[in-house]
Amino acid sequence: MITVFDDIQRLHNPPSFIVAGKPKPLPERPERIDMLLEGVKRSGGTIVAPPAIGNETLSLVHDARYLAFMDTLWERWQRLPDAADYPLPNIHALGRPSLAPVGYPDSVVGQCGYHLGDGSCPIMDKTWEAARASAASAAHAASLMLEGERMVYALCRPPGHHAASDVAAGFCYVNNSGLAAEILTRAGKRVAILDIDVHHGNGTEAIFYDRADILTVSLHADTKRFYPFFWGYPQETGRGEGEGFNLNLPLPRGTKIDDYRAALAEAFKRIAAFRPTLLLIAAGLDISIDDPFQGFAITTADFATIGRDIAALKLPMLVVQEGGYPSASLGANLASLLEGLRS
């Protein structure tokens, strides 16, 4: 197995994010990388660094205006008098798809309200550099799959599945899974995305919601009382040409392996009906019983079971790292999942 990882990803290190209106220590911190790399070492294989990518590649799934905003945000924010240490909006463009007309401001504060979706996407001086390196890891992993690899792991940090085409949110700035899926699809692969993160992959859903050429499936904690709150409901099935190509399987907090496997079986039925040639796994390890978000109760041994269940689909697999936050079992959980996937 090849792992793709760029050490530049360590540079993103904001101190906090907003929880219930208060700043709290950010769990999506650089030490995640070392824990995940420990899991990679247990699994074996080689680690390669990706070539850098530019906006031409990022624009496959992201709006040009959003990319320009991210390219210049930190420098512009520093010029504001008496501003916060990192960019935070004091107004949001709420409901902008349905409120017409919606103008696009020149002000960096206004643009923050347009492009920063919540209080959990803090940005510091090296954030965008790290996010681009994370995206490059996913893009290069996709290239390796196109060269004939049967399984590649992209160690992407910061993660990506909450980032929409023009919005950062939920620790995510570039939609790494979406970018890899788009690269593969344009090269002729028929891609199904299986998102097993404890949080709904609302950014991925949004990017592909109107399309029939990529299937998006998400198993996650019920968003009625869990982030991202507004998306992830069963009635979200796609729109227009995309109708029927999005499947959400919300599960109760505290879900254990038996009920999780039952939901996986439902996901597999939809995936089989789609008849993909490649499976992209948005691998959120925050379903762990030890994860600080305490969404599900999946044990280290359970991760191998989940991996074996997915491997039974007999598809080439691109594994893109999403959530999974510092805990004593994080590295072991990754190793267990990868072991199961290779069975």
Image: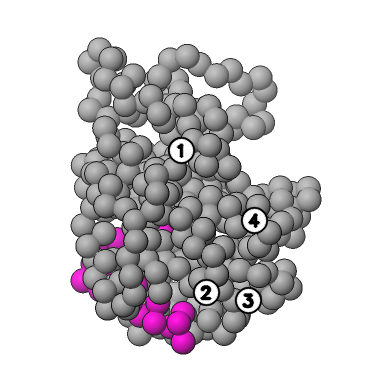
Q: Are marks 3 and 4 in contact (CB under 8 Å)?
A: no
On the rendered structure, is 194 left or right of 328? right
Q: Amino acid at mark 2?
A: Arg
Looking at the image, the residue that sits furthest to the front is 147
Q: Secondary structure at mark 4?
A: loop
Distance Cα–Cα, label 3 vs label 2: 19 Å
Q: Which residues are magenta?
A: 322-343
Distance Cα–Cα, label 2 vs label 4: 16 Å
Q: Are marks 4 and 1 in contact (CB under 8 Å)?
A: no
Q: How far across and how far down the image is residue 132, in percent? A: 39, 43
Q: How far across and how far down the image is residue 87, in percent? A: 32, 28
Q: Earlier in the sequence, mark 4 or mark 1?
A: 1
Q: Residue at x 38, y 53 (%)?
A: 50
Distance Cα–Cα, label 4 vs label 1: 19 Å
Q: Residue at x 41, y 31 (%)?
A: 70
Q: Please tell me whether mark 3 or mark 2 is closer to you in this view.
A: 2
The image quarter in which residue 263 lies: bottom right
On the rendered structure, is 210 left or right of 281? right
Which residue bears the numbered disc 1?
Answer: 54
Which residue bears the numbered disc 4?
Answer: 187
On the rendered structure, is 310 left or right of 215? left
Which residue bears the numbered disc 2?
Answer: 150
